[in-house]
Image (spheres, coloured by chain):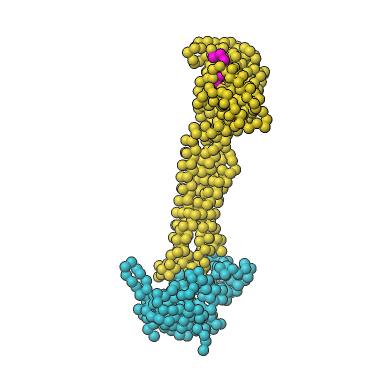
Amino acid sequence: MLALNSIRELRHRPLRTLLTMAGVAVSTAMLADMLMLGGGIQESFGDLLESRGHELRLSPKGTLPFDTEATIPGFESLRDSIDRVPGVARIAPVLAMSVTAEVLDGDPEGGSGEAQTLALGMEPGDASLYRLVDGDLPGPGEVLTDAGLGERLGVGPGGRLRLSTASGLRAWGRSVTVRVSGTGDFVFATARDRPLTVPLSDLQALSALEDQVSFAMIRILEGEDPDSVRDRIAATVQRAEVVTLAGVTEKLDERLSYFTQLAVILGSVSLFVAALLIGTITAVSVSERLGIIAALRAIGVSRRRIVGDLTAESAILCAVGGGIGVALSLVVARYLESILATFPGLPAAVRFFVLRPESLATAFALVVASGAVAGLVPALNATRLEVTALLHREEP
Amino acid sequence: MNPDVVRARRVTRDYRQGRTLIRALRGVSLAVRKGDFLAVTGPSGSGKSTLLHLLGGVDVPTAGEVHFLGRSLASLSVEERAALRLREVGLVFQRFHLLPMLSAIENVELPLAGARVPRRERRERAAAVLERVGLADRLRHRPSELSGGQLQRVAIARALANDPVLVLADEPTGELDRATSRQILALFRELNAAGTTLVVATHDLEFAAGAHRRIEVVDGRIGS
C-alpha cells in the first residue's frame, strides 16, 4: 500500500519526478559511456590486431609497429634465423614511410592531384594489411592505393603516380613512377592518413633502406602457444623486439591509461551525482512526510516496511531514469565517436566506445544500487526519529 | 468486573528539551477496563497525549510500568510494541494523518496489509468498517475529496480495521466544527456500545461529557 502511495506521489509531482529522472538519466548515460570508453579502445584495437591473422609482431627495440620511423636493419638474415625457429609458419615484413604521391596520369580535376601519405612496402601477394576493393594486387613498379586516397588524389586503377620520399636525409628528393594496380581498404588507415602499398623491394630502393623493414608480422603454426614461440624467437633474435598481440594490447593499455583514468574519474563523479540527487530528493520527500511516517509508526507499521517503501520510491526513480540513461548513452556514444573518429594517429577502424551489454548493465545496476542506498539513508533516519516527538511536532 | 485492557502504575515520563528536563507525567496510575469510554481532559501541555502514547505503547515511561492485556510493555522491543499496536490498538489523530495519494478504502487497508491479511479479505474488511462509520459511498475518494468529518471517519475506520481491543483518540474533534464533532461523538458512543474500549484525549468538554468516565490531567498528574 505504501509503495502504491509512493508511485502515486511520483505521478502527483510530475515536474520534480521528471527532473529527477532526467538527472539520473544524464548521470547513467555519462557512466555507461565512461565504461564503454574505459576499455573500448583497447578492446577494439585488440580485435583489429587479431583480425590480421598474425599472432606475433617483430619491431625495433622499444617500439611498436607504426610507432616510429625506426627500422630493423639486416632483415634478411634475421628472417633466416626466425624461419628456423620451431612453430613459425610465415613472416610478413612491412616497411612504412611517408611519401608524397603526385598524379601523373588520372583525373586530377576529380581530386587534389597530390598528397602526402604513408607508403607501406609489403611483399608481393601479401594483403595482410588491406582488403582488395578494385583491380589487382601490386607487382613490381605498381602501387595499390587506399580507396579514400585514390578518390582524394583523383586516380584509379590504370593511372600513374609519382612517389617521392618526403623525409629522411639519405633519400631526400628521390622519386619513382608507378602504375596504380588497384584500390583497397587499409585496416590501419587513419582519418587523415590514407595509405598506399608498393612492393617492399621498390620502397626499400626508393628510400635507400635496402634490407630494412619497419616491422614484421609473424604467423605461428596451428596449435602453437604464442608466448612459447615468442620466447624462442626472442632467444634467437636480440636486435629486435618480439611481442604477442596481448603484449601489444598491454603496451597500448599503458599508453591509453589517460583515457582509462579519465573514464574512472568521470564515471565516479556521475555515480556520485546520481546518488546525491536521489539522496536529496528522498530527504526532501521524507521531510515532507514526517507526520505521515510518525503516524504510520504509531499505528504499528514496521520500520522495515516504511524504509522499504521509501527506498522503493528512490529505486523507481533510478530504474526509470537509468533505463532512459542507457538509451541516451548510446546516442551520446555515437555522437562522441563521430568526433573522435578523426583522432590523430589512431586507425579509423578503432572504436573509442565499444558497445558491450555488460557496460550498460553495470552502469544501470550501479546507478540503481547507489540511488537505493542514497535513498535508504534519509528513510532510515526518518524511521529512527522518536515517534512521540514527531507526533508532538505535527499535532498542535 | 471487566478485566483491565491496560493498566498504568505510577508512570513518569521525562523529556529533555535542550538542557531543560520536562516532566510530562508525574507518577500517574490508571486502569482502563474492557468496554470503557474514558475521556482525558486537561489544558494544552498537561500530559494528555503523553498518557495516551504510554497507554498505547507508542512510548515507554521513564519510571513506572504499563501492562497491556496483562503484559508489561517494558519487556517488549520497539518492533514488538509496533506489532502489538498494529493488532491490538487503534490510534486516531487530530490531523487524521491519512496518506494523501490513497483512497479511503486503501487507507483503511493499510494496517490490514501490515498485519498480512490477504488482499481480498482486507478489501472486504476495509469496506465493511467504512460502511460502519457511514462512508459506504466514499470508498474510492481520496482525502483531498473528503470533508473534515469524513476524513476523521476514515481515520477512525483505519483505527478499527484490525478490530483492536483499545482505541486511543488524541483530540479527534480538534479540527472539526461543532456539528461534526457531535457526529464523531455519536459514532464513538455507537462503537463503545458495540464493545469497543475507547480512551479519548480532548479539550472539548461537551465531547468529554458524552464519555462514561472522565479524568483530568493537570501538570502531569491526574486531578480528578
Q: Quadrant of residue B29?
A: bottom left
**Chain B's shade in the image?**
cyan
State the quadrant of the N terminus of chain A.
bottom right
Q: Quadrant of residue A234?
A: top right
Residue located at (63% from left, 70% from top):
B121
The image position of residue A226, as x and y in percent, is 61, 31
Q: Is residue A386 above or below residue B27?
A: above
Q: Is residue A210 magenta?
A: yes
Identify which residue, A26 or A263, lies in the foreground.
A263
Residue located at (44% from left, 75% from top):
B54
Quick one: which residue is furthest to the front in this view?
Answer: A235
Quick one: which residue is furthest to the left in this view?
Answer: B19
Identify which residue, A54 or B223, lies in the foreground.
A54
Instruction: Give, as a single range, the part of the protein colored magenta.
Output: A209-214
The answer to whether residue A108 of the structure is visible from this angle is no
State the quadrant of the C terminus of chain A.
bottom left
Residue located at (65% from left, 14% from top):
A139
Type of secondary structure dominating the magenta stretch: loop
The image position of residue B151, as x and y in percent, is 50, 70
- Chain represented in yellow: A
Identify which residue, A309 or B184, lies in the foreground.
A309
Q: Is residue A213 magenta?
A: yes
The image position of residue A99, as x and y in percent, is 53, 16
Q: Quadrant of residue B175?
A: bottom left
Q: Is residue A330 above or below residue A348?
A: below
Residue located at (52% from left, 87% from top):
B2
